[in-house]
Image (cartoon, rainbow, N blue to C red):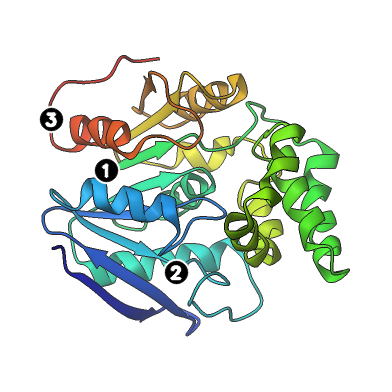
Amino acid sequence: MTTITERSVSSADGTQIAVSSSGSGPVLVLVGGAFDHRGTPFVDAVVAAFSDRYRVVTYDRRGRGQSGDNRPWSVEREVDDLAAVVADAGAPVDLLGICVGAAVVLHAVAAGVPVGRVVLYEPPYRASVEARADDVLFADRLDEMIDGGRRAAAVRAYLTRVLGVPMLQVSAVPLKPKLWKALLADAGVLGRDVRVLGGLVVPERVLAAIGVPVLVAAGTAGAVWARAAARAVVESVPGSRAVVLDGQGHVPDPGVLREAVDAFLLGGPTPDPD
């Protein structure tokens, strides 16, 4: 049985960040999406799939799970949080960023957080270099929904606008009470994730500053815009590579994701490039 170690680390502003590690081997820090943190089903599945070969470190981003939430919030403080997790894990450290977590990773690496290599899965940008006013203002509208007690509306809006989930699927989510309760619990910080994404625009200037090896993956069964976003990130990060994972949607099978990560970090058969 794999031993799980839990602790907290202090970010630069004193915010306590809850951290867990599992397994042994090269250190891989996982930064999940908007609704993924320690103990959520997808994160647990990824940890289980990876921890026989890696020491997988997961953490609750500020304002989520058991981490603190000192104000004011900013992207820079999210970067500080990840920097504290990386420093605590000890060098060398590689990063795996999924969905919005990929955007957090990109900001952190561009800011100089010391890591070896980076794997990203479907950062949810739209492949554009020009901000759309309604996307920029969308974060404010999510905050207004939360302030008005409309958490369910905020979750539905985020799922459809940012993740591109069809409305019919979104309407069915409340039929899964445990999942819906978990989504509502994290609704209060969804506006932050839109800001991390810079209004859903590929941050070319940020990405141009990255100087470590980067692999960007997307799935063939997901949205066309997600594959386009992956290509746009690769075009903006010097020396980066793209792969497409056959049959995978926006929530990939952890075993398939593991194969792509192994090939990039440890060497081995490489998935087909995009």
- State the SS at label 1: loop
Q: Nearer the viewer, mark 1 or mark 3?
A: 3
Residue 14 at what x, y percent from top left?
47, 85
Q: Residues within 10 Å of mark 3 (few under 14, many from 20)?
A: few
Q: What's the amino acid at mark 3?
A: Gly
Task: List x then y, in percent, for residue 56.
Answer: 25, 57
> Does residue 243 appear to the left or right of 133 in the view shown?
left
> Which residue is labeled 1 in the image?
117
**What residue is at 31 percent from the left and 14 percent from the top?**
272
Name the one closer to the observer, 172 or 245: 172
N-terminal-most mark, 1 or 3: 1
Residue hosting label 2: 81
The amino acid type, in three-letter code, at marker 1 is Arg
Identified by mark 2, the residue type is Asp
Please tell me the numbered disc located at residue 267.
3
Query: Quick one: label 1, few (<14), some, or many (20+) residues within 10 Å?
Result: some
